[in-house]
Amino acid sequence: MKKLCSLLAISIFLIVFLPACNKGSGAVKPTDSPTSLSNQTELPTSLPIQTDQQIPTSDTLTNTSKGSGDFDLPDTLVGLDSLQSYHQSLQTTFEGTINAEPQQSIATLKLEAVDNPPTQLSWVETGDQPVQFFGRIGSIDYRQPSPEATCLTSPSNDDNSDQPSTAYPLASLPPISGAEFVNEENINGVPAKHYAFDERAIGFADQATAQGDVWVASSGGAILRYTLSLQAPAGVLGPGVQGVQTWSYELSEVNTGKTTLPENCQQPQENARVPMMDDAAVILQHPGYLVYQIPGGVETAVAFYQQQAEALGWSGGEPYQFGDVTQVTFRPEDGSLVQLTFEPSGDLLTVTVQTLAPMPAE
């Protein structure tokens, strides 16, 4: 079946995440408010197919579209800023037809956040594409385009105004007006209240059919689980479009402080043991991260570091070419990782050195 690339979650990922491949991930701490998030990124609220039809927001829901219950959830980010740490996961799917042709799509977003040290780790998977990882721990940004790829690190930019912010998974959940109380339950160790709702509560009365459930924390009101299935006839999602859209959201590991940094994304080493070449002009230097320029060519620089690595007993050192950029990776005996990138810049050569410490034992 053809993939439906305009699925709501995919559009969020393309707008928010993929630019981060070039600019770094604008990490959002658990204590960041929805206001600070919206100031950084305009988050779309459109349905999976990019049409004029949109999911109603808290501003557009009216009494005529209210469900039969008494519970309202106009702000899906409620309670999140009071948590010290958490894990989130959201999976959205679409299955249906566009102009009578079968369409199917799936997207998954996972996020782990800790308040201290400021940490946000995100995994994005869309369709058959490899899982992409973006993260920030303290002052270090991480990016890994696939699980097998090298994990790139760089100092984070303290001024995130020019960086796209990672979208909370909650940002794509429709607000609710008029859900019915079901019972009290325990979700992932947290006491919760369970509510059920239908298409009326999300502003689609007389347009589509929907069945949804939401579990909110009894204390603080944070959404612990949210499931929704929206069945839309032709014309509701867009011209010639009909099908089923689903959302499945879960909040877990609340206040446990747990994170799972990918194995390849080792922590930057505080004291790099990598020497600089002669006549080096330092451009940027942070713990585990060094950028400098020298007069000379790539071959000379690569040979210099290969000789240094051999004298130190390091393994690796095979150069890889990516356009004009050459990358060399060494593995010191202590299990750390040294990544060097060489990029010509006129008559100068820019050398970037990243030193990553061994992964800590579990």
Image (spheres, rainbow, N blue to C red):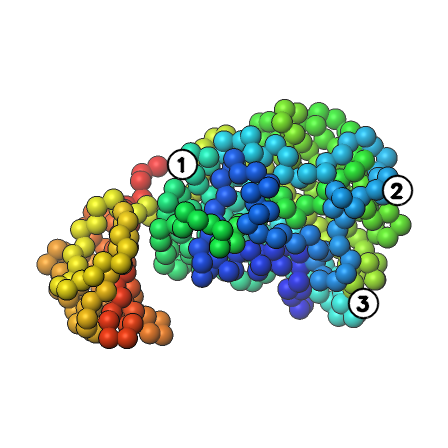
- The residue under label 1 is which amino acid type? Pro
Residue 274 percent coordinates (x, y): 18, 55
Q: Residue furthest left?
A: 311
Q: Quadrant of the C terminus?
A: top left
Mark positioned earlier in the residue sequence (1 or 3): 1
User: What is the spatial separation of the Cα atoms under label 1 and label 2, in whole angstroms?
Assistant: 46 Å
**Count of numbered labels shown in the rendering:** 3
Residue 135 percent coordinates (x, y): 44, 48
List the residue tagged with mark 1. 117
Q: Is 159 displayed left or right of 234 in the figure?
A: left
User: What is the spatial separation of the Cα atoms under label 1 and label 3, in whole angstroms?
Assistant: 49 Å
Front-most of 303 and 210? 303
Q: Residue at x 44, y 41 (%)?
A: 119
Q: Residues within 10 Å of mark 2 (few under 14, many from 20)?
A: few
Which of the labelled discs sits on residue 274, or is there none? none
List the residue tagged with mark 3. 240
Q: Is 169 displayed left or right of 60 in the figure?
A: left
Residue 279 seen in this snapshot: yes
Name the element at disc 2: helix
- The residue under label 3 is which amino acid type? Gly
Name the element at disc 1: loop
Mark positioned earlier in the residue sequence (2 or 3): 2
Q: Residue at x 53, y 62 (%)?
A: 129
- The residue under label 2 is which amino acid type? Thr
Mark positioned earlier in the residue sequence (1 or 2): 2
Q: Residue at x 37, y 45 (%)?
A: 139
List the residue tagged with mark 2. 64
Front-most of 250 and 165? 165
Q: Give the foreground label among 2 and 3.
A: 2
Q: Is residue 250 above or below residue 70?
A: below
Q: Quadrant of the N terminus?
A: bottom right
